[in-house]
Amino acid sequence: EDQVTQSPEALRLQEGESSSLNCSYTVSGLRGLFWYRQDPGKGPEFLFTLYSAGEEKEKERLKATLTKKESFLHITAPKPEDSATYLCAVPSGNTGKLIFGQGTTLQVKP
Amino acid sequence: KAGVTQTPRYLIKTRGQQVTLSCSPISGHRSVSWYQQTPGQGLQFLFEYFSETQRNKGNFPGRFSGRQFSNSRSEMNVSTLELGDSALYLCASSPGTANTGNTIYFGEGSWLTVV
């Protein structure tokens, strides 16, 4: 069964303290791994799509990487405005539906 | 370029009533998916439409239904509302179907409270 697991569930950082979020996945035939950011009361905001092991993408203080079994979202020198829930998801087989992890809620304190 | 637009943003309904939610995808996108988000279950897939045809359906009862129009706009309907239907309902659009690896963009969601 296709599955996505994210860790940790919650992460508290001081401003400027770099860290990484993990997304482990099990899916037959990866057709992309998506990272989203979700603020309270809002819909998920697209961040990155990764398609193959070894691929990396960056946007401001965020960098996403992909291996055959997991993806990491590295946050370098975070700021309070980076506080949000980060979700990763993969398309499930041929169904077209996205399987989401439970998310990592990040809090960055000034 | 306008994003995915969902209406209404907030609504309160009574048990037993029905509700219709609307979604306008990004211009040019032909695939529309719907998801339910609750604190306990996270994001759960409801269904996907492509070119007015339902391609996939999640594990939800028949009270949940949807449709897509020729302009790709979509609606979902929930009949005989139950308290457990209270959730954030998210619409997402992509150029093609999700299983082809197209990036999927979400709207802001419709907050449904059932009392």
Image (spheres, helix red, strand yellow):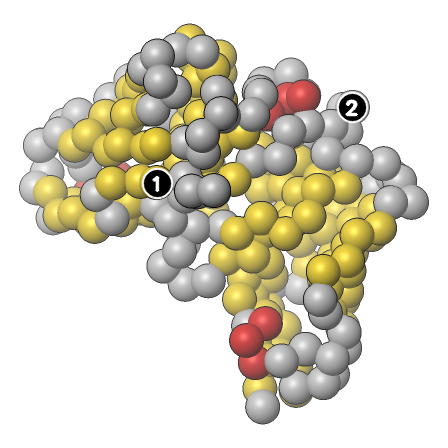
Q: Is residue B52 left or right of residue B31?
A: left
- Residue drawn at x 9%, y 32% is B17
Dot 1 corresponds to which residue? B5
- Residue drawn at x 47%, y 47% is B42
Q: Secondary structure at mark 1?
A: strand
- Residue in front for this viewpoint, B82 or B76: B76
**Residue B107 shows in this picture:** yes
Structural distance between the alpha carbons of marks 1 and 2: 31 Å
Q: Position of residue B59 (x, y in %)?
A: 43, 24
- Nearer to us of marks 1 and 2 is 1
Check the image and report above or below for B21 versus B88.
Answer: above
Q: Are marks 1 and 2 in contact (CB under 8 Å)?
A: no
**Residue B59 shows in this picture:** no
Check disc 2: other Cα within 10 Å, few if <14, some if 14-19, many if 20+.
Answer: few
Q: Is residue A45 left or right of residue A79?
A: left
Among the 4 quarters of the image, the one containing residue A59: bottom right
Dot 2 corresponds to which residue? A29
Q: Position of residue B113 (x, y in %)?
A: 19, 48
Q: Position of residue B13 (x, y in %)?
A: 11, 42
Among the 4 quarters of the image, the one containing residue B7: top left
**Pointer 1 indicates a residue of which chain?**
B
Check the image and report above or below for B12 versus B103.
Answer: below
Callout 1 amino acid: Thr
Callout 2 amino acid: Gly
Check the image and report above or below for B48 versus A73.
Answer: above
**Both labels 1 and 2 in a single chain:** no
**Pointer 2 indicates a residue of which chain?**
A
- Residue drawn at x 40%, y 56% is A42
- Residue in front for this viewpoint, A62 or B30: B30
Residue occupying the far bottom of the picture: A110
